[in-house]
Image: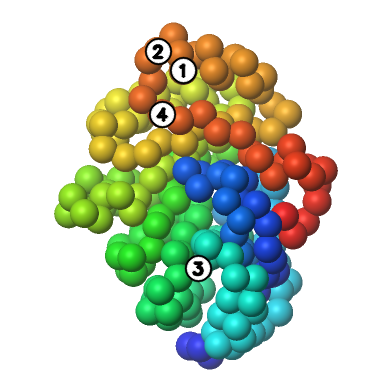
Amino acid sequence: MSAGTLNISEIFHSIQGESSFSGWPCAFIRLAGCGHGCIGCDTAYAESGGVKLAIEDVIERALAFQAPFIEITGGEPLFQPAVYSLMQQLCDLEQKVLLETGGFLSVAGVDSRVHKIIDLKPPSSGVCDQNNPENIELALAAEPHHRQTFEFKIVVASRDDYEWATELLKEHCVMDSFTIMMGVSFGKLDLAELAEWMLRDRLRARMQLQLHKYIWDPGTRGV
């Protein structure tokens, strides 16, 4: 694949379902390929396949939606080297660019103008040992005006996941400086339980729903 080509799973227009931008119309560019095999992955179809497109074509298709935000997601988007050029070019076009990454790879090379939504995978994912600690370090070391471009997202499926998450967040003191989004793995944990735990612990985090799964059938693609 050439430096100016990306393997694309889908490009679509939808309502942002997760992160601090939840509820906003958004153009999504979903890159194909991951390989980490998270248990409960809801975009396993993006693990393989895809269509090779030139960066210029990807940008043209995304801009056609005239959405207030463009999100780069996957799969794992940072696996494809050309994604860094895609993000830079979109920023140069004065687009508000979001990156959603599984948190396995460092975001050190991502354009500083991109808003980085970084997953922290809990034990139930089966891959929590693959979380890249450098991403928390980069966020903490960022200049104050760049700190607002980092947020962390944790999707929990059990009490064990929640306790793991709270211990990690407190250990690194990230709740004082960054937006922390915490939600439930769809259908795996009662929403009220998570809400009660967060309230009891006075957790400095925002509870989120996977909004798109309530608007559309949870198995629907392209939303």
Characterize the local packing of mark 4: few (<14), some (14-19) or many (20 or more) Cα atoms within 10 angstroms. Answer: some
Marks 1,3: beta carbons within 8 A: no
For disc 3, the marked residue is: 79
Q: Earlier in the sequence, mark 3 or mark 2?
A: 3
Name the quadrant of the C terminus: bottom right
Residue type for callout 2: Asp
Characterize the local packing of mark 2: few (<14), some (14-19) or many (20 or more) Cα atoms within 10 angstroms. Answer: few
Q: Residue at x 18, y 50 (%)?
A: 144
Q: Distance of mark 4 from mark 3, alpha carbons? A: 29 Å
Which SS class for mark 2?
Answer: loop
Q: Residue at x 69, y 33 (%)?
A: 186
79 or 99, nearer to the observer: 99
Q: Nearer the viewer, mark 3 or mark 2?
A: 2
Residue at the top extreme?
200
Residue type for callout 4: Ala
Marks 1,2: beta carbons within 8 A: yes
Which SS class for mark 1?
Answer: helix
Left or right relative to 12: residue 164: left
For disc 2, the marked residue is: 201
37 or 208, nearer to the observer: 208
Q: Nearer the viewer, mark 4 or mark 3?
A: 4
Q: For residue 128, say whether it is visible.
A: no
For disc 1, the marked residue is: 198
Q: Residue at x 31, y 31 (%)?
A: 175
Residue 205 is marked as 4
